[in-house]
Image (cartoon, coloured by chain):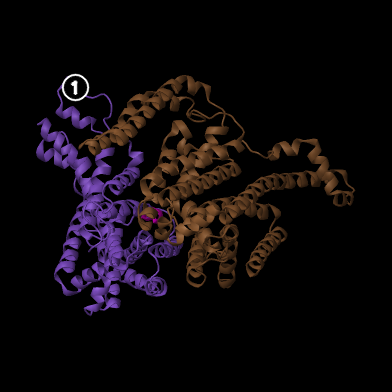
Amino acid sequence: MRNNLDIKLAFGVMALLLVMIGFLQSWGVALAILNLCLISAVMSMGVNIQWGYSGLINFGVMGFLAIGGFATIIVSVPPVTEAWSAGGFGIILSGLILFILIAGIFYVHRKWQSKYKNYLLFFLVISVIPIMKLVAGPSISAIESIDAATSGFLGGFDLPIILSWFVGAFFAAIIAFVIGKVCLGLRSDYLAISTLLISGIVVSYVKHEEWLTRGVKNVTGLKRPAPFEVDLQNSDWFVNFIEYLFKGRLSKITDFEEKVILLNDLVMTSSSIFVKLCFSLIFSIVVITLLVFSEKALRSPWGRMMRAIRDNEDAAKAMGKDVVKRHLHIFMIGSAIIGFSGAMLVTYDGLFTPASYQPLRYTFIIWVMVLLGGTGNNYGAIIGAFVVWFIWIESAPFALFVINTLMSGIDNTNQLKMHLIDSIPYFRYLMMGLGLLVVMRYRPKGLLPEKIIKN
Amino acid sequence: MDFLNAIVLLTNYIIVPALTYGSQLALGAIGVTIIYGVLRFANFAYGDLMAFATMVVILTTWYLQSLGITLGFLPTALLALPIGIIATIILSLFFDKTVFKYYRDKKSEPVILIVVSIGVMFILNAIVRIIIGPGDVIFMDGARFIMKAGEFKKMTGLNEGIALKSTQVITFITTIITCAILFYFLNKTKTGKSMRAYSNNEDLALLSGIDPTKIIIYTWVIVSILATIAGSLYGLDKSFKPLSYWNNLLPIFAATIVGGIGNPLGAFYGGFVIAFTEIGLTYAYKKFLVYLLPEQLEPSSLVQYISTDYKFAISFAILVVVLIYRPNGIFKGKVI
């Protein structure tokens, strides 16, 4: 009972704060916070499944997000035909050779029985890179040289962008399978470090393979599942709708020209709000579906088994549970959800910027969300995402306010004051750190602690 | 003659940079490994501790320069090191008392301590960026070169030259001296021995009357000294940028684990292993082979294993290989 009350209270406060921002700042900001919060809720639920359900520590969030973002490029961008004709054959050929090499490595790994097996494997793995370079090198430079300023990459398949969310999840699950096979046997702190480092490898691949992702040149102007603002502003039904909506305000103005200006203004602002609302709707559907499924999973025999493994691995083993396999599965599921949210994030931003993937921002902030909200509790993960985003966005105005009040007597040209105002964006990291430390100390189970489920 | 040219080429482009970079990694890795050995957690805040220490050194350097005090051909930052060390020790002890002690007394799992260290990392990162700003700071003064490539060529009459930046020499020499003192301390002095005993078996160490609070204070002091030296050397050699210290933490972790976590000597070698592989694999050997091979066999491509874009990825890949084949590191870990 008390737990339900907590959840309702937390969500009530969250809604209230959003409405407050809507009235005090603008509805655009409120919706932006809501949307980012919904995306981050998906991310933190993914991490929560790994960390909260089964105690796996995954610091590779950034890598899986980047994979999800990469999937949006592959799925939704129209193919660049000249690039395909210039280097497509070479790329496909090298893909085939890569496949054969990997198959060979697996064959040696599984079937070969020899003293020198490990050396041979090592040699094979090492040889992949020069071989690939030799085969694919000319095609890659051919592709990158085609219209380098605006394109210079292969493009994708020109499919609806929503599809990419699922593709992103699938890609992330594959990568998670590979990482899990290598790292899951390690102790928790080794697992943390090695997933962090591997996500670094993934991001540096996405950043530097320009023929595939345009790398640091970024891909902009992605498709959207929601309409574009410009289209809305030029469509009759939307203008009529806005006219109908603000009939009262418009009828008060008698001058025709002023009326047109006000209407234009209203159409402008409400088109962006409308687009954000569309996104909110889609994201909410995702979050609610995911929440329902993960709550169901938590209560199912599967969830019970996972908690048993988390709480006492040896006992679970003794009951005949295959702990390694279960860990691998949950690592893949959680990573798939993170990949899904990575694709959502890129879709919402409308651009893919590989250079922006920094562990501080895309791994540890997500972790702060999970730990703040409550490990093992899906509602907690959502609340955590909201709290963190709220602090993240509102700490800059807040810090400005504090600086201005504390130093109100001091002239605006004062060096110290100017320096402090310049460094306002970094106060949010300070808040994050302090928040994390306070929660870890005084509420180690998070704002909404895990519910003990009695079966 | 061609053979000598080839050797000089390699020295200039691989050995000298790798020794410098390796020294920086080694100092950092020893700090991480000592924290792991004594306090038993991987400290994610270490990179930002280094950044903080360097920041204090830079501010002191600026102050000294404004007073007109310099060290001649040596960088003034060396004079500022003690101030940086003291500030960092105070900071470390402060965070230990306010943050880490609570979890140590509660005997929390290592994962919790990692998470807490991430909180400290956020705070330090913010403090450094608020105080000194996010941009590049170059605080190197004094002589830039000990030997320029042109002078070397004139001296020896070879086609290739070796350029020795003074920061490179300072880095290497300081690292060797620091490590020598550290290993002497750990192996020969009573405090060092008790630290090792505590790291090896906490209960036995407590039983034989070793004072844990003292050990922990010593650990933070040593770690702070190492962080200040490593951070300042890195900042002198490259330039100071708060985020690059955080990025540097990742190869430092790789070096720590490659050398066997908890093993300072291993961390020392681990740093050089990482540095030499990183630079050796990203170097284009074309010119080197042109010197050595007969004309018909000269390569047309760059003969580079992997492009320099993937410099960081190499250290991570080494780590993965080590984790698969020797999870305890090349040198057995877990004891300092």
Determine the image quadrant of residue A233: top right
What's under tag 1, amino acid-wise? Leu
Q: Colour of chain A?
A: brown
Q: Main secondary structure of the magenta part?
A: helix
Instruction: Report if residue A305 is visible in the image.
Output: yes
| Residue on which disc 1 sits | B297
A419 over A164 or under it: above or below = below
The picture places residue B271, in percent across and down from the top left corner, at: 25, 52
The picture places residue B260, in percent across and down from the top left corner, at: 25, 55
The chain that hosts pointer 1 is B
Q: Colour of chain B?
A: purple
Q: Say whether residue B173 is left or right of residue A256.
A: left
Tell which of A298 and B17 is nearer to you.
A298
Q: Say whether residue A272 is left or right of residue A141.
A: right
Q: Check residue B245 for magenta coloring.
A: yes
The picture places residue A449, in percent across and down from the top left corner, at: 56, 66
The picture places residue B173, in percent across and down from the top left corner, at: 18, 57
The structure residue drawn at horizontal position 56% and vertical position 46%, both measured from the top left corner, is A341
How busy is the neighbourhood of tag 1: few (under 14 within 10 Å), some, or many (20 plus)?
few
Determine the image quadrant of residue B182: bottom left
Q: Which residues are magenta?
A: B240-246
B16 over A4 or under it: above or below = above
Which residue is outermost to the bottom? B209
Q: Check residue A157 for magenta coloring.
A: no
Tell which of A107 and A164 is nearer to you.
A107
Q: Say whether residue B114 is left or right of residue A407.
A: left
A124 over A322 or under it: above or below = above
Instruction: Report if residue A219 is visible in the image.
Output: no
Which quarter of the image is occupied by the N terminus of chain B? top left
Q: Say whether residue A68 is left or right of residue B317.
A: right
Which quarter of the image is occupied by the C terminus of chain B? bottom left
Q: Secondary structure at mark 1?
A: helix
